[in-house]
Amino acid sequence: MDVTEKYTLLTSMTDETDDSILSSALENAKQVIINHLYPFIEYVTETDEETGDVTKREVIHDMPARYDALQVRIAAYFLNKRGADGQVQHNENNVYRYYESGDVPKSLLDEITPYGSAIR
């Protein structure tokens, strides 16, 4: 799914048309997915052949395409709850509103299978 398709879906789900807001919501959703997909920091050790200096750098992962639809759904969740961040419960004129969690609902995060590997 390309960025244009994501913007189109997100606009239809939220009525938001500002590209910078859509982009921000999609980027935040992507980071949520990556953080849950790769819960442990992974480092690569590199040795400079000339000096022998050893450096360690963090491996930066990208989001797999299979999570594109989930990214749009999480972004829509972010946009649809604006103005009531962190709301736990609300009752007005018999309309009840509460959020499953302060950030992203567990039901959406449960769709992410964390990556892991064995240590040898």
Image (cartoon, rainbow, N blue to C red):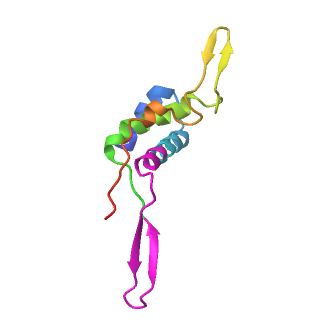
Q: Tell me if residue 39 can be seen.
A: yes
Boundaries of the magenta span: 32-58
The quadrant of the rendering that contains the C terminus is bottom left
Where is residue 56? Give x, y as percent. 45, 73
Q: Is residue 93 part of the magenta span, yes or no?
A: no
Q: Residue 23: give x, y in percent of width and height.
A: 50, 43
Of residue 16 and residue 28, the one placed in the foreground of this image is: 28
47 in magenta: yes
Count of picture labels: 0
Q: Residue furthest right?
A: 92
Residue 2 in percent (x, y) is at 35, 43
Q: Is residue 19 above or below residue 61?
A: above
Q: Identify which residue is drawn at 42% across, 62% down.
A: 42
Comparing 96 with 21, the one in front is: 96
Q: Position of residue 99 (x, y in %)?
A: 58, 26
Q: Quadrant of residue 7?
A: top left
Q: Residue at x 49, y 36 (%)?
A: 75
> Residue 82 or 95: which is nearer the viewer?
95
Which residue corresponds to the image point at 43% horizontal and 49% vertical from the top-left? 34
Find the residue positioned furthest to the bottom.
Answer: 50
Q: Is residue 36 above or below residue 8?
A: below
Residue at the farthest top position: 94
Residue at 45% x, 85% y is 53
| Apparent side of residue 101 relative to residue 114 in the rendered image (left or right) | right
Residue 7 visible (yes or no): no
Pick the residue in front: 9 or 102. Answer: 102
Quarter occupied by the N terminus? top left
